Image: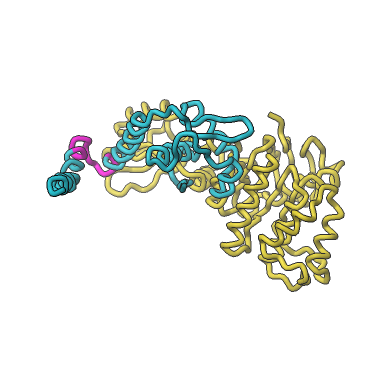
Chain colours: A yellow, B cyan
Amino acid sequence: MDSAIETSALTKRYGHDRALTDVDFSVPEGAVCLLAGTNGAGKTTLLRILINLERRTTGACEVLGLDPACNGAAVRAQVGFVSETTDWGYGWLRVGEMLAHVASYYPSWDPQYALELAQILAVRMDRRMKALSKGQRRCVQIVTALAHRPQLLLLDEPTDGLDPLVRDRTLRLFTEHTADTGCTAVVSTHLVSEVAQLADHVAILRSGAMLHQGPVERMLGELHRLELDAPSGWSAPSELQTAVLRQDHAIGRSPTLLVTGQLASIQPLITKSGAAIRHAGRLDLSEAVVARLQSEPKS
Amino acid sequence: MHLTIDPSQPRPIYVQLMDEVRRLIVLGELESDMPLPSVRQLAADLRLNPNTIVQAYRELERAGVVYVRRGHGTFVSAQLKLPEERKRILADVVARALIEAQRNGISPDEFAAGIIEATQPASKALVKQAKEA
């Protein structure tokens, strides 16, 4: 399968600060990729580099087969983008004028579809941009991101500031768009549970480095929550240390371990240490992302 | 027709979706040759990745539960073996309950005895009803 996004050794420095370090980010065509990470991990910087709103310091980057640093406008014309900030300027423009202005950048803009989207999201065309609340400005962004039926959606905290009803409608619109166009999407969000059903790929950034990426099913298949029957004072054997992401404090005598790897190779080590697995369970996507973020940095 | 998907459940979502379709068939909500919702509609209704639904439908087709008519959609299989489907669902429910029992330190024998005890008043009431009728 071809990649919609492919970066290698992508690095971004602001003076002496490194925002991104050697990031290899790959999203196959047609995937919906959750981009997760701690605050300040570089998610927004990464998304902005992909459409050349920021320039990379070093490394390579290809989006829809083009290098955004050389073909910024051509890439942006095929990308639906919801930026993290809703502060656009153009406060004096009415929403309808704003949409007409944005439309001129996109050859494939569908004015009829734009009107439908605006209606679904309760966007009023006669309001001035400066009079809109954060959530309403976000809705205008969502209209502009979808109305040209892009092949690639880059969504940076797309539901931040939206009320529960509009949030639900927005998720429905994104889902319909994905089903209709087979487009690729990258969604950066702190609300993992919101996109847990939509995402089939996941990428986790920590302190500017790519901590983990790949299909969601693979990540969930590699993580296990083990409830153990263990003698008192038991602790994980040293052979297991690399596999254990977290050991929860035992209540009574059954410690719980979060481990990564193949269960078949972990089980004998547990048995050898004098404990038995009472129950092995899977994590959901939110738990898995937190478990990955909590794990000790590799030295 | 109502499908319930719980993303916090440990089972993969496409497996949950397959089980839900099977459940609706066994309950009689879905009958032979009835169409399943389109991928787009179900994806939008459940806010699910369309590929997940494609995967679930494909697996159901492989299992002979549904068939695909090109350009028309996905339909419930005509030669569905209902008793076998019921057995499958029973096995799933039992397996889930046994895991829950095990987590609570209840042995399979204890659990089976508990089930019989819990259902006896109900079966007695049924027998009584049958006699009265």
At x 50% / y 26%, what residue is drawn? B62
Q: Is residue B11 visible?
A: no
A214 sits left or right of A243 in the view: right
Q: Residue furthest front?
A: B133
At x 46% / y 29%, what residue is drawn? B78
Relative to A194, say whether A9 is above or below.
above
Return the x and y of residue B19 as percentages of the image width and height.
Answer: 43, 38
User: In this orientation, which residue lies closer to the viewer: A18 or A248?
Assistant: A248
Relative to A102, say whether B19 is above or below.
above
Return the x and y of residue A59 as percentages of the image width and height.
Answer: 77, 37
**Location of residue B22 by image quarter:** top left
Query: Residue B111 magenta-drawn?
Result: yes
Tag count = 0
Query: Residue A76 magenta-drawn?
Result: no
At x 45% / y 34%, what residue is drawn? B32
A107 sits left or right of A116 in the view: right
Relative to A64, say whether A137 is above or below.
below
Residue segment shown in magenta: B102-112
User: In this orientation, which residue lies closer to the viewer: A105 or B41?
Assistant: B41
B88 sits left or right of A57 in the view: left
Dominant secondary-structure state across the stretch colored magenta: helix
User: In this orientation, which residue lies closer to the viewer: A182 or B61?
Assistant: B61
Q: Is residue A178 visible?
A: yes
Return the x and y of residue A45 as percentages of the image width and height.
Answer: 72, 50
At x 63% / y 42%, what residue is drawn? A32
Return the x and y of residue B50 as percentages of the image width and height.
Answer: 60, 41
